[in-house]
Image (spheres, rainbow, N blue to C red):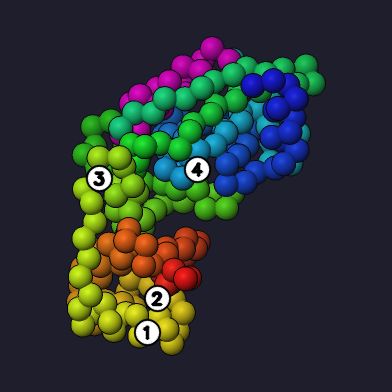
């Protein structure tokens, strides 16, 4: 990471692939941001940069790099690999962490000693908790995921008719439409998305599905 490349990242502002942090926080919060990048398109986490793009720098690069390693190894499952650079701007040091999109997704943020973790993704310039359907869909995108098979029955036909009329549908709406559990509705929608029939859209208040345009 060169000084010019960092300046370009900062000039572009926060986005789906760039996040600014004024200072280091807890390993759990670092893990959340890195996990979200790995589960989406990859991205850069910049420490020592304020939300208004001003350079404030970091205090102890060694300690902060150790926190990044701790977050990647012990607070994310499966563990993440990250590239870390220390770049000097305006006489202050900025820590740049890069995580690529991961073939092992979904990665979960886990607290040592706890059994279950949480999946995060990037939505615009925020790291948000993924819905169950998005987490399932991420799992199906792994190289070792089994092939998808679909069948078109009464439920699927009802779904397609609804989408032709209304354009989009949520998991809860589909569950009510065909009188099945939310879990079963989500499984059907994810399977159809994997098959390229539907497309999932992320919104701040939840996901919805649309037909794929021909």
Question: Which of disc 4 and disc 2 is earlier in sequence?
Answer: 4
Q: Residues within 10 Å of mark 3 (few under 14, many from 20)?
A: few
* Image coords of residue 58 (percent x, y): 64, 21
Nearer the viewer's eye, disc 3 or disc 2?
3
Question: Which of disc 2 and disc 1 is earlier in sequence?
Answer: 1
Residue at 24% over, 37% down: 114
Which mark, by number, is residue 162? 1
Question: Which of disc 4 and disc 1 is earlier in sequence?
Answer: 4
Q: Which residues are magenta?
A: 61-77
* Image coords of residue 15 (percent x, y): 62, 46
* Label 1 – label 2 distance at C-alpha: 8 Å
Residue at 43% over, 34% down: 31
Q: Quadrant of the N terminus?
A: top right
Magenta span includes 162: no
* Image coords of residue 11 (percent x, y): 75, 38
Which mark, by number, is residue 196? none
Residue at 21% over, 82% down: 154
Question: Is there CB contact under 8 Å for labels 3 and 2?
Answer: no
**Looking at the image, is 20 positioned above or below residue 24?**
below
Question: Is there CB contact under 8 Å for labels 1 and 4?
Answer: no
Camera-nearest residue between 100 and 92: 100
Instruction: Give the farthest residue toward the top.
Output: 62
Q: Which residue is mark 4?
A: 41
Which mark, by number, is residue 145? 3
Magenta span main SS? helix
């Amino acid at each position: 990471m060169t000084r010019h490349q960092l300046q370009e990242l900062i000039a572009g502002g926060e986005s789906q692939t760039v996040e600014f942090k004024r200072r280091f926080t807890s390993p759990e919060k670092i893990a959340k941001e890195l996990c979200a990048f790995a589960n989406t398109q990859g991205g850069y986490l910049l420490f020592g940069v304020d939300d208004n793009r001003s350079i404030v720098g970091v205090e102890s690069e060694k300690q902060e790099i150790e926190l990044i390693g701790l977050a990647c190894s012990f607070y994310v499952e499966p563990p993440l690999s990250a590239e870390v650079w220390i770049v000097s701007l305006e006489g202050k040091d900025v820590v740049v962490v890069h995580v690529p999109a991961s073939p092992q997704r979904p990665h979960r943020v886990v607290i040592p000693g706890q059994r279950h973790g949480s999946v995060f993704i990037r939505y615009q310039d925020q790291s948000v908790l993924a819905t169950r359907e998005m987490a399932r869909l991420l799992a199906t995108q792994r190289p070792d995921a089994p092939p998808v098979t679909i069948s078109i029955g009464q439920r699927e036909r009802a779904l397609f008719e609804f989408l032709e009329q209304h354009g989009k549908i949520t998991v809860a709406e589909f569950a009510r439409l065909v009188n099945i559990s939310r879990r079963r509705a989500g499984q059907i929608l994810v399977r159809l998305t994997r098959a390229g029939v539907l497309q999932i859209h992320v919104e701040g208040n939840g996901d919805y599905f649309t037909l794929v345009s021909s």
